[in-house]
Image: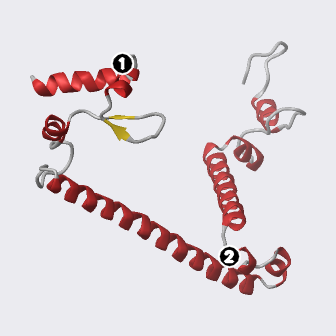
């Protein structure tokens, strides 16, 4: 019991005071209202469920607006009037969309594998050997020289005038340091 001014309170008065609800204050301890308002576990679960519901709604809205199967999705009235049919239509559209996405991912991966194979054959053709990675570049540079990207054409070039344009740039300094390090 907090300290108060006045006569000493009896045990019965203290129990009544603990169970009394005062305006603009928390309910007394031991009541359901007090547990509901002060329970950290309940508020944590409630906040997480609200956030998960918002994430699910945002994902659903983004997917429905960006999918190519928009016309196959049920409209909002169908969801309210025939929820089972609407769910089945949504699942069918989602499966078709995921198949398209899987095909796109497979083609991108195949393109990457083909690109790696082309690079390996290029390294073999230019004396790089079967080694993977950057190990073969020093031999390649000694044989063919250092090349830079021409800003006008966007192509690799060995032109000395283009190299002079790069003299002040950090990229060219790094290339020079790398060449010094590799030649020593």
Q: Where is residue 151 in the image (x, y as percent from the top left)?
A: 46, 33
* Identity of the residue drawn at 25% across and 62% down: 117
How crowded pointer 2 is (Cα within 10 Å; few <14, some 14-19, many 20+) is rated as some
- Nearest the viewer among 83 and 140 is 140
Instruction: Relative to 1, say whether 47 is above or below.
Output: below
- Nearest the viewer among 101 and 28 is 101
Question: Which quarter of the rendering shows the C terminus?
Answer: top left
Q: Position of residue 170 (x, y in %)?
A: 37, 21
**Element carrying mark 1:** loop
Q: Position of residue 154 (x, y in %)?
A: 44, 40
* Identity of the residue drawn at 11% across and 26% down: 183
Instruction: Relative to 23, say whether 81 is above or below.
Output: below
Of the numbered discs in the image, which one, if any, rests on residue 167?
A: 1
Q: In this rendering, would 181 be left or right of 25?
A: left
Q: In this rendering, would 29 be left or right of 164?
A: right
Q: Are marks 1 and 2 in contact (CB under 8 Å)?
A: no
* Identity of the residue drawn at 83% across and 15% down: 7
**Element carrying mark 2:** loop
Of the numbered discs in the image, which one, if any, rests on residue 69?
A: 2
- Mark 1–mark 2 Cα distance, whole angstroms, equals 53 Å
Q: Position of residue 82 (x, y in %)?
A: 80, 85
Question: Which quarter of the rendering shows the N terminus?
Answer: top right
Indicate which label's residue lies in the foreground, 1 or 2. Answer: 1
The tag earlier along the polypeptide, 1 or 2, is 2
Q: In this rendering, would 183 be left or right of 48?
A: left
Of the numbered discs in the image, which one, if any, rests on residue 77?
A: none
- Nearest the viewer among 146 and 1 is 146
Residue lying farthest to the right in this orientation: 23
* Identity of the residue drawn at 61% across and 75% down: 94
Instruction: Relative to 5, say whether 162 is above or below.
Output: below
């Amino acid at each position: 019991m907090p300290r108060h001014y006045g006569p000493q309170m009896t045990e019965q008065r203290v129990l009544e005071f603990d169970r009394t609800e005062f305006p603009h204050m928390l309910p007394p301890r031991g009541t359901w209202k007090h547990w509901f308002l002060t329970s950290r576990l309940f508020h944590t679960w409630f906040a997480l469920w609200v956030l998960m519901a918002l994430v699910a709604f945002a994902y659903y809205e983004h997917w429905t607006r960006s999918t190519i199967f928009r016309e196959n999705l049920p409209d909002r009235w169908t969801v309210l009037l025939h929820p089972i049919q609407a769910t089945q239509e949504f699942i069918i559209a989602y499966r078709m969309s995921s198949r398209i996405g899987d095909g796109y991912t497979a083609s991108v991966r195949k393109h990457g594998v083909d690109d790696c194979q082309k690079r390996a054959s290029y390294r073999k053709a230019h004396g790089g050997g079967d080694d993977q990675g950057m190990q073969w570049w020093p031999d390649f540079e000694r044989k063919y020289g250092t090349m830079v990207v021409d800003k006008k054409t966007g192509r690799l070039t060995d032109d000395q005038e283009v190299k002079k344009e790069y003299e002040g740039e950090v990229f060219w300094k790094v290339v020079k340091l790398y060449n010094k390090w590799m030649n020593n």
